[in-house]
Amino acid sequence: MATESYVLKVTEVIEETADARSVVFEVPSELQATFAYTPGQFLTVAVPSDRTGLAARCYSLSSSPHSGRHQITVKRTADGYASNWICDNLKAGDTLRVLPPSGIFTPKDIDADLLLFGGGSGITPVISIARTALEKGTGKVVLFYANRDENSVIFAAELAELGTEYADRFTVVHWLESVQGLPSQAQLSNFATYFDGYTSFVCGPAPFMKAVTTALKDLGIPRERRHQEKFVSLGGNPFGDVEEVLAAQQTLAEADDADEPGDAPEPAFAGPVAIEVELDGQQYTFDDWQGDKVLLEFLEEKGVDAPFSCREGNCSACACVVLEGDLSMKHNEVLDADDLGDGIRLTCQALPLSEKLRISYNG
């Protein structure tokens, strides 16, 4: 099933560092409501490819919602086709097909004290959260930002400006591998110890996120105050007809290296299944899920506006927490053992394993 997507014009491509570009989209007035977002969410874009027609990729919004700006930031990776294509080819005046904002890596209380961890390009959703919390919230914001070296620091000038403007509320700690080595779990734990009671958000390379989340768990930070962003390159196409997508875009295609990994589905409980769902402060109750379709599709049929993006198990946009019962997943590229142990499941891949379920999208 394809998701409704839209062609947006690129108004600006900004060189943030030698390896990172910010892309600013023009969102027409009639689509402002469709593209409304919360800090920490991401866009899924269609990058042209002469092998598969297009490569779908998720990139976090680095702008803040109240700015009226829709800006993603992309850092090239050594073997990443899409990131290199964007950094080398995309220019103002081009157009790309884009899915509306999605993702649950976002604060529920913008006035809360926030402890943010960003590693490399993981700063992208984190700076959106920081900007919004500082400019629209009242709490304190602490950012631990790890990079390879000084030249790799994305948004260095803007972070310095925020630090000056909000000196009483904003603290930035820069950690450079070239100077201090990689941050250890013990060092991260010692740092986090000083911010007990803060709500944490972490985004960055997998080893960095693992070290941070383990440190926070060891400190006894409860699950509701630990948030981790995850998504990987999408192997399929959530945009629908490839020829239609390419006809609407004014950009040139190059080779793509996307894969389409797949897992065998696990056995599911034969319905009917009773399920309670908590989403955006509302409660939904159903007793007729037959288990013949994944949970996301069942909720959509019931008229529930459940979050999603890729429908492939490659991003965390549709993630929920299982509070009672259990769900299997047909495919999972993004949740690790700790996530699964915490009861997190991807509803776009979820099938029932019990006759009664209770889930929450609110963490």
Image (cartoon, helix red, strand yellow):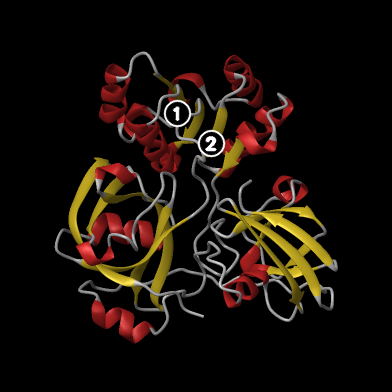
Q: From mark 1 to mark 2, how far is it between C-alphas?
A: 12 Å
**Residue name at image x 22 percent, y 68 percent:** 95
Q: Please name whichever residue, 360 or 195, is drawn nearer the observer in this view of the structure.
A: 360
Taking the image as drawn, is residue 63 in sight?
A: no
In this view, 224 is above or below 82:
above
Q: For the residue labelled by badge 2, is the local secondary structure a helix, a strand or a loop? A: strand
Taking the image as drawn, is residue 149 in sight?
A: yes
In this view, 120 is above or below 324:
above
Disc 1 vs disc 2: which is toward the camera?
A: 2
Local packing at callout 1 (Cα closer than 10 Å; few below 14, some 14-19, many 20+) is many
Q: For the residue labelled by badge 1, is the local secondary structure a helix, a strand or a loop? A: strand
Residue 327 lies in quadrant: bottom right
Q: Where is residue 143 in the image (x, y as percent from the top left)?
A: 45, 26
Q: Position of residue 199 (x, y in %)?
A: 56, 30
> What's the residue type where badge 2 is placed?
Phe
> What's the residue type where badge 1 is placed?
Tyr
**Residue name at image x 45 percent, y 21 percent:** 140
Say whether residue 7 is left or right of residue 273. left
Mark 1 near mark 2, Cβ–Cβ under 8 Å?
A: no
In the picture as drawn, the residue positioned furthest to the left comes out as 93
**Residue name at image x 73 percent, y 45 percent:** 338
Q: Which mark is residue 124?
A: none
Local packing at callout 2 (Cα closer than 10 Å; few below 14, some 14-19, many 20+) is many
| Among numbered discs 1 and 2, the one appearing first in the sequence | 1
Say whether residue 93 is left or right of residue 112. left
To which residue does mark 1 refer?
A: 145
Q: Where is residue 154 in the image (x, y as percent from the top left)?
A: 33, 36
Q: Please name whichever residue, 358 or 185, is drawn nearer the observer in this view of the structure.
A: 358
To which residue does mark 2 refer?
A: 201
Say whether residue 265 is left or right of residue 127. right
**Residue name at image x 62 percent, y 19 percent:** 196
Say whether residue 356 is left or right of residue 60. right
